[in-house]
Amino acid sequence: MSPPPSICMYGWRAWIIACVERTMQLPFKGSIQYSVCRAIRYVCSCFACLLILTVPSFCSGQSTQNGFGQDPLLETLQSKGLLTSAEVAAIRRGDSHESSTKTLATLLLRKGLITKVDYDRIIQQNDAAVSRTAQSAIPGPPLISPAAPAATERRHNSSEPVLTRAQQPPNSTEPGAPSIVERSASIAINEALAPVRVFPVGGVALDDHPPISINGVGFMPYGFIKTTVVEDSSSPNGDDFPLPGFISDTGPDGTPEFRVKIRSTRFGINLRWRDINPKWTITGKIEGDFEGNYNRSDNRNLSSIRTSNPSLRVAWGRIDYQFNKSNSISALFGQDWTLYGSSTLPNILETTGLGVSFGTLYERDPQMRIGFTHKARGFTAMPEFSVNLPVSGLPPSTANLAEQLGYGERQGPDSNRPELQLRMVGQWQLDHAQGVPPAQIIFSGFEGRRTAVVVGSAIPTAYRSTFSTGLSTGSKQDGWDAEWQLPTRWLTLVGKVYSGADLRWFFANELYSFFNDATGLTNTVTVPSVDGASNVVLGTNPSGQQVVAPERPVRDIGGFVQLGLPLSRIFNANPSGRMAGWSIYGLFGEDQAKTRDINWLAGTRHGSAMIIGTLNYKMNKSLSFSFEQSLYTTRANPEQSLPLYRGVPSRVWNDMREEAGPIFFF
């Protein structure tokens, strides 16, 4: 029995019920016909109920010009907040099923719910379906293409929704903001934990449909608002992040502190320029935070503690050229993370210091960088080389604060030579389970030099005949490291080991830099450098010559290891439920300066270590909560007089630190 034209006014369910009532008029009660008809009516009623529950409302599709109509997938996406009512209405207004599919795919791509690979595959199959429809009367293809039979088969399992739930926010590759994991399948899973990666291997993949486009330039803003409460059992320097101990003494109770912290909030924008040749990709990034210096102005003096200035983190432009599917080349110009030491970073809540001199080793530098990527048989190799701004990490003395405000530092640039860095990355898929990012092994190194200048007027009278016009001296800087990032479906292990000389600029070396080796010299005198950042030692050698004491770098060794467990995946939580965002991390890091070197400085700090546990709950792609318990420790140099802690000589300084709060991503 075909449905009448008015069926769209009532729907399939009402029409089925009306048909049953019209065709099953019961005879006179008590007759044989009555009993038979009653049984038939019972069977037909059951069948009608089944139809009511299972037959799709195709009339809704007719009323929306053959679009999606009252599609349960759209309703599910809207109920979970992945689509707005306006977006759903736009999809339903499509001229055809294929048009609606394209609109939906575009929206999902913009929201980061599917990758560019997924989008291209859907559009390709959708276009093929349009061609077939033009040649026959067969309706358009379903949203999930039959080309992926495994995904389609699992789609009908009610416990596994069709769309993957993004566990991480996009554009958040910095610590405290875990990065998104790209995947090709559209099956709901609990993600493995992705390492924090600030360098792409190969080309930069950005959205082909940025939310803002002006004159051919695409803009994609991103960032997060981070508010935490912090309590330190000992914070002798008054900072809102941990520094090594024994830099200064504390009060009798260790100088505990409590803070509510907001200045770790971060903002940035990704850029993309289009080129007529698809082999060229031109991208850029500008990123900043509010972790700059505190303000001093007439309207901010009283409230300077809550008025930290914005500061630049990275700003660069990048050019990529793809020769073929296996080989590409890239060049970057601007300020970015350094090749040496910055490839592997810990995923912790405290990101202002990020383990300064506790074993992390990282930095951001102005640089010019070139890289080459080769892919073969499931393995990707990428060597990179950069020419960097030469730096020392020795700003002018407090007496020369105006000079620091004027030019930052000068002992690096005064070397009149660039700093050279390189790294080699190998990437492969260690665990082929779904939702697991590839593994990486990284080796990196650098070489540089610092120079201290002393003007002639600062030379003591006894040495002026030898150094009448002044002098310059300096020390070398170099280092190497090995890093690993090994994500699997059940755990993620990352870490690094490093060694080098004068790693102060990279937030290591117990913050020492160099020492003056006055071995064998007599009649020594100390002369300040032109910027007051360091002292130069003059003396007389055994031959009676007046010389400059050699400056030698303080040597250092350190590293960290961090283990992450995806709790929601381990305990098989519902990927689309509220329990899908749990993870926990444990970290140990250590940095240690060579005792023989720091003895020349009468250095009191020998080594520092940190133990950190971080519990994260990601409520959705835009909101997460974290709690972090940590212990920071510094050991005194046993070959020097013990430094003061709590007013008494001590061998160990400890800071028991708690930090917790939400992070809002955008």
Image: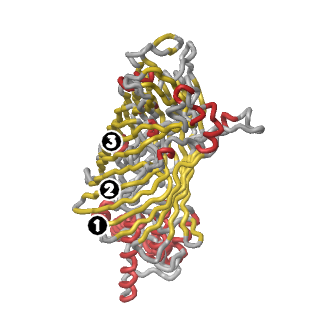
Q: Is residue 409 left or right of residue 481?
A: right
Q: Quick check: can you spot residue 646?
A: yes
Q: Is residue 254 above or below residue 577?
A: above
User: Mark 2 touching mark 3, by CB under 8 A?
Assistant: no
Q: Secondary structure at mark 3?
A: strand
Q: Locate the N terminus and report the quarter of the image it occupies.
A: bottom left
Give the residue at mark 1.
Answer: 326
Mark 3 — residue?
A: 481
Percent from the top left, x then y, of residue 461? 57, 27
User: Three-letter amino acid code at disc 3?
Assistant: Asp
Camera-side mark, 1 or 2 = 2
Asked if the residue at tag 3 contacts the one at tag 1, i.e. Cβ–Cβ closer than 8 Å, the answer is no
- Is residue 340 depicted above or below 635 in this figure? below
The disc, 2 or 3, on the residue closer to the chain's N-terminal end is 2
Look at 42% across and 28% down and name the residue there.
545
Q: Position of residue 435 (x, y in %)?
A: 33, 53
Residues packed near mark 2 inside 10 Å, few (<14), some (14 to 19) or many (20 plus): some
Q: Which mark is residue 383?
A: 2
Percent coordinates x, y for residue 4 in the rendering: 48, 82
Question: Is residue 494 or residue 29 the one in the foreground?
Answer: 494
